[in-house]
Amino acid sequence: MNIMKARYLFIIILLGLISCKEQAPLPADAPEGEITQANSIDGKALYEQNCLNCHGSLATTYKKDVTPTQILTGINNIVRMQYLVFLSDEQILEISNALSSKNPDNISPKISNAAPSGKYPGATTSLNLAVVTDLASNCYYDSIDVGVDEMNGQLFANADKTSHQKAIILSPGASYKFYIHCVDTLHQNVTKVSQLITFSTDLDAVDSTPPVITSTFPNEPYLGGTERAKFYLNSNESASCRYSTDINSNYDQMNTMDTTGTLGHVQTLNSLVSGNSYTYYVLCADPTGNISAKETLNLSVLANVNGSILYQNHCTSCHGSISNSSKSGASSQEIQDAINDIRTMRVESMLFLSPTQIDAISNAL
């Protein structure tokens, strides 16, 4: 009988040891940030589920090459990260791996053979803006050095998406500056810095044709509560554009727009009032002094402040629809603090929100 009891106790103890076996810790000699294999854990998916809202996508995040120790320190010391205490050591390591520059998923395309450059005869009517990439990519350009998502134009690519070009219409005696960013098609990684292309044309051909303002924006009222906004216009050739509220002002009496001198022109407006209408007059002059026809911009601000529409325009992509938002019940102060503190929210569209609009979004939540 004692022998049977002893065997029974031995089996119980053995089963207990097996069931209580702990998860193996990180290897003590594993260098921080080193890429290791974990078949059952996807670091990219873990990052997107737990980190993307605050730190942006893997392609654009400023947290590249963060080590497991740095992630764990953040979880332990930063209030907004303390809800991540459930992450295991292995999961933290895989998030670090996904952020590592050694990870093939994080390799950005490289640009070479950028053209054109130098000075061209004034009779040159067009040139191809062109670059070559080492990875299959989509390439975008703008006359302003902005992020890839804000660039206005796209270069056309060949079949394997490594050669890219776009014809640019030229004017005599003009200087051109373009910035290019490329995004690889496999992992959506963006070039780390923009490629600058500059060139010019001689003033050896007579230009007697004035520039034409081809489009203006916005073409509908600003949302209620807007106090600060921008208007935009495009011209068919490089020009310097000016604006005024006086219909009788000539070009020399007008104010120079904030951003001008190329094909795209931008002006910031301040102290707008809900329910008011505004009229601006714009003239553009090309490098040879030809002046466009006067363009009239009729702008207005809606009288009513609609928090639901403001939320839809500014918040839905990150926090879901207003009916099931992850930020339900957020106060005006919490929204303002997030805009001040979270890098991915410090974008122009959010920074331009007025206190009245932030209150409206909070009320809608």
Image (cartoon, rainbow, N blue to C red):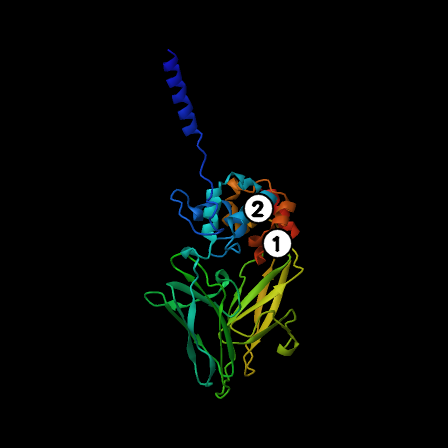
- Which residue is pictured at 58% across the width and 58% down the height? 348
Where, quadrant-wise, is the N terminus in this rendering?
A: top left
132 lies left or right of 354? left
- What is the number of the mark on residue 73? 2
Mark 2 or mark 1, which has the lower sequence index?
A: 2
Q: Give the x, y percent position of residue 11.
A: 38, 22
Disc 2 residue type?
Thr
**Vertical comparison of 312 with 185: above or below:** above
37 lies left or right of 284? left
Q: Secondary structure at mark 1?
A: loop
Q: Secondary structure at mark 2?
A: helix
Where, quadrant-wise, is the C terminus in this rendering?
A: top right
- Which residue is pictured at 62% across the width and 55% down the height? 226
Q: Which residue is mark 1?
A: 353
- What is the number of the mark on residue 111? none
Disc 1 residue type?
Leu
**Vertical comparison of 177 with 27: above or below:** below
